[in-house]
Image (cartoon, grey):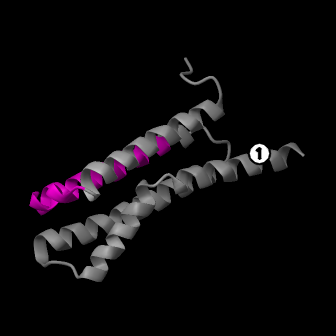
Amino acid sequence: MRLYKSDKTRFIAGLLLIVVIYSLFYIYFLENANVSSLSGVIRHGIAFAATVAVYLVGTSHLGTLEDKWMSSLWHFVHISGLLILTCLGLFDLLISDISFNMRRFALTVLEFLISPVLYVGMGLLNRSLKQQKNI
């Protein structure tokens, strides 16, 4: 049984879910002044959970693409980013505080992974490739 009638509906549903996760993460976590009172483990856990949620939504909604290399690219980017964030987070928690520049780098990687930009880019690339095949 198909839950979505078309690939376009599936793509838009995935985009809306990612936008909701992204918005909630920023409103309730990054822009919230009370977050600094949370322990580092909880902060890292929330960021990791948001990133994994976006990865799973994207995997689910981009999983039906004809071009399998695009799905592989999605996996590669997210798993690489999660590995970088995990290494930096574990270093910060277990060994020593990371520098301000490394913290900014980690936030940039996190931003890239949870923002809808990569998902939209994959959708636009898929659409462009489909149109070229139909010509």
Question: Quick one: which residue is furthest to the right in this view?
Answer: 135
Above or below for 93 versus 115? below
Image: magenta residue range: 32-59
Q: Residues within 10 Å of mark 1 (few under 14, many from 20)?
A: few
| Image quarter of the N terminus | top right
- Spot occupied by residue 18 in the image (x, y as percentages of width and height): 45, 44
Residue at the image point whose x is 65% and y is 28% from the top: 6
Disc 1, SS: helix
Residue at the image point whose x is 34% and y is 64% from the top: 83
Q: Nearer the viewer, residue 132 or 69?
A: 132
Numbered-mark total: 1
Indicate yes or no whether the magenta region holds residue 37.
Answer: yes
Q: Nearer the viewer, residue 118 or 25?
A: 25
- Spot occupied by residue 85 in the image (x, y as percentages of width and height): 31, 66
- Spot occupied by residue 43 in the image (x, y as percentages of width and height): 19, 58
Query: Which image quadrant for residue 111?
Result: bottom left
Q: Nearer the viewer, residue 66 or 92?
A: 92
Residue 37 is left or right of residue 132, and the answer is left
Indicate yes or no whether the magenta region holds residue 49.
Answer: yes
Residue at the image point whose x is 38% and y is 48% from the top: 23
Mainly helix, strand or loop, the magenta region? helix
Question: Quick one: which residue is furthest to the top in this view?
Answer: 1
Residue at the image point whose x is 53% and y is 56% from the top: 117
Query: Which image quadrant for residue 33?
Result: bottom left
Query: Which image quadrant for residue 89?
Result: bottom left
Q: Amino acid at mark 1?
A: Lys
Q: Which residue is mark 1?
A: 130
Residue 34 is left or right of residue 68, and the answer is left
Above or below for 37 versus 101? above
